[in-house]
Amino acid sequence: MTIASSSPPSRLPLGAAEEARPKPRTDRAGARETRGDGRLAAVFLAPALLGFTVFLLWPTLRGIYLSFTRFNLLTPAEWVGLDNYVRMVHDPIFWDSLTVTVEYVAINIGVQTVSALAIAVLLQRLTQSAVLRGVVLTPYLMSNVVAGIVWLWILDTQLGIGNEIIAGLGADRIPFLADETWAIPMIALINVWRHVGYTALLLFAGLQAIPSDMYEAAKVDGASEWRMFWRITMPLLRPVLAVVLIMTVIGSFQVFDTVAVTTNGGPANATNVLQFYIYGAAFGRFQFGYASAMSVALLVVLSAITVLQYRLTRAGQTDLG
Amino acid sequence: MRTRTVMALTGALALSLVSGCAQGGAAGSGANTVTYWLWDANQQPAYQACAKGFEKENPGLKVRITQMGWADYWTKLTASFIAGTEPDVFTDHIQKFGQFADLKVLEPLDDLDIDDSAYQAGLAANWTGQDGHRYGAPKDWDTVALFYNMKMVKEAGLTAEELNTLAWNPKDGGTFEKTIAHLTVDKNGKRGDEPGFDKNNVKVYGLATGGAGDGDGQTTWSPFTGSAGWHYTDKARWGTEYQYDSETFQSVTDWYFGLAKKGYLAPFTDYTDGANPANAQVASGKAATSFDGAWMISTYYGTKGLDVGTAPTPTGPTGKRATMMNGLADSVTKNARNKEGAKKWVKYLASDECQKTVGSYGIVFPATPDGTRAAVAAYEKKGIDVSAFTEPVTDRKHSTTFSFPVTDYAADVYALMRPAMQDVFANGAPVSGLTRTNDQINFLLGQ
């Protein structure tokens, strides 16, 4: 990164820069060439820009507009001002689902980050095997819904192989997904199982960027692995870890599919995470205005968390070099 | 020049994608085709046979049937209304009818001249909206009965006759509670009505669980609330007040869920929509009996290694047995591409001719009496006695039927009642808490 900043790339094409000084005539020619590049750039950017506008910008703006309306999708939207937001503030189920979501994120991200870090460090310090890296990534290749259904079957109180084993060992069966205390932690762990390999791989890539001579120097000085982890690995991995955290926290807040296939928000709203509540309001009850208002609230919460995380972890700076 | 070419190509590609989507959605419908959706795969061959008859009667018209599972069905139907790709005709459920009426996506069918008396009682009338127009033509019906594992019943020394004459009351549960207690067996082989029974280590539950029942309790608590004389709403149709705050309702559900605390009814934690519904609990030998609907007959009787019998729902404090009698209908969509053809098809679906054909497959009870008779005969041929399901409809002296609640805000009622009932069953919340939920629901309906 330091190398890049010491020699900023020239904006002008090389030929134009050389000829620029003596003859103003060729300068115009150079400018024309630059304009030509601009046009070509526009062409290359167009697909992405089109996608961004159609699939992100427009839906976001429209979603914000709809949050101020009563809208059932089939009849025209009716402007209701702040009604949806007032209702949201007074809706105990909304606050409950926000709490449930935060609980989920805390367990999911906590367990996932620690285990991913452990796996990544082990991968880096102990083995360079590509096969092992592949194995770690395997659960991530499975779709969320399939993973959810497989775990639903494994954890089923009566029929699940997980509970058969527990019962076989002489212990009481555990209603992993049907009990209000177990359900959220279990869903969080199912998603840890699926995502931990991917997260570990991202962190592993970050670890690869740490120069190995630092470890060698530390070893010469007699530092233990534990000490090297805290004094070298953690500080130098921080920017990558921060970005990974921001990404995984955003993803985690948006949990939906695992809940939809395993618990359907139950028992008694114990796993009614925010996205699931929003989905129900929109596609179950046709209250698209209210669902949009809750989505905007989620957007605000996520933006705030992202900015905060970015600031706190100084994600844009590195201690390397 | 080159950039322009690229831009033109990009534009053309984008346009073709957009128009391609639009074409894809409308594909298959047109002047000569009627598109028809249903969710029950078991019924598709029967309706395919009907379509053949219809096409013979109406040369030039073709019916295209699409089947998809229950959960996908409603999601796709909703999406199709929004995208304008809805089918011409679809199988409609009374639980969704209120919402579709609200959204104004159904075509009135008054000009089909449906004669209410041509169908089993109550089926045709349910499909009239608050505006007085008809939006569905009766198709079939179902009731709920008690399925039981024949082997377990024999081992318990019980007879089919005893199961056919069960009665219950909210005080001591009557012969019904005694029977399911006797059918319950714990880890040590002790029955539920024997001293030393360990309710925390049950091997076989007397009654399977179908979950908390949401707001309708169709195959869970409704046979009991119904035979105690309770009704969902203040009026048979389009009521404006729900009655989950009634003392009758709350005491009956309290008793019903209390069966789980005694160890006779499988607990909430044993139930999962996807993995372990009531029929799976019976099939795996974890439960001796279960309340389930007529639509499950083929599933229970088709389960390998399970010798199954059926009994009507128990007689309640009113002196009658009770079951929900739910009927499906065929509805035409407001934006049907082939409205003319669609109405003809619905008229044919509602005719004795088609319903007898469907009945002959022995998979569902068609709405016309002749269709029902054909179904009963077809079931008999397969060696299945379905009287536990038909008696409530034919024997009005000893039984009563009630329908699914038809009101506005049906989706909201569901969204509020589902967690509330789960709270009672799963978390042991007091039934009196349902009064608050009921207030919320009635507040909505009063808007």
Image: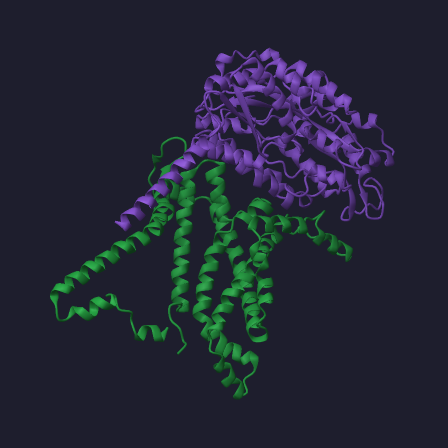
B42 or B171, nearer to the observer: B42
Instruction: State left or right for residue B160 relative to residue B424.
Output: right
Looking at the rendering, which quadrant does residue B213 occupy?
A: top right
For the view shown, which residue lies furthest in the bottom direction? A221
Percent position of residue B38, x then y: 57, 28
Counting every numbered tag in the picture gives 0
- Give the residue drawn at x 48%, y 38%: A283
Decide if residue B341 is in sight here: yes
User: Residue B419 location in percent, x, y?
Assistant: 57, 41
Q: Is residue B378 above or below residue A307?
A: above
Q: Would residue A249 be found to the left or right of residue A52 on screen?
A: right
Quarter in which the C terminus of chain A is drawn? bottom left
Chain letter for the part of the structure drawn in green: A
Using the image as rendered, state which of residue B108 and residue B233 is in the foreground: B108
Q: Is residue B134 visible?
A: no
Vertically, is B326 above or below A128?
above
* Residue at the image position 43 percent from the left and 69 percent from the top: A239
Residue A24 coordinates in the image, percent (x, y): 12, 66
| Chain identifier of the purple chain | B
| Image quadrant containing the N terminus of chain A | bottom left
Q: Nearer the viewer, residue B229 or A5?
A: A5
Query: In the displayed structure, would residue A27 be above or below residue B275?
Result: below
Left-right relation of A38 to A177: left
Q: Residue furthest front?
A: B1
Q: Who's the residue at 84% across and 48% down the image?
A: B188
Front-lying residue, B226 or A65: A65
Q: How is the image coloured?
A: by chain
Percent position (x, y) of residue A12? 23, 66
Which quadrant of the figure has residue B371?
Answer: top right
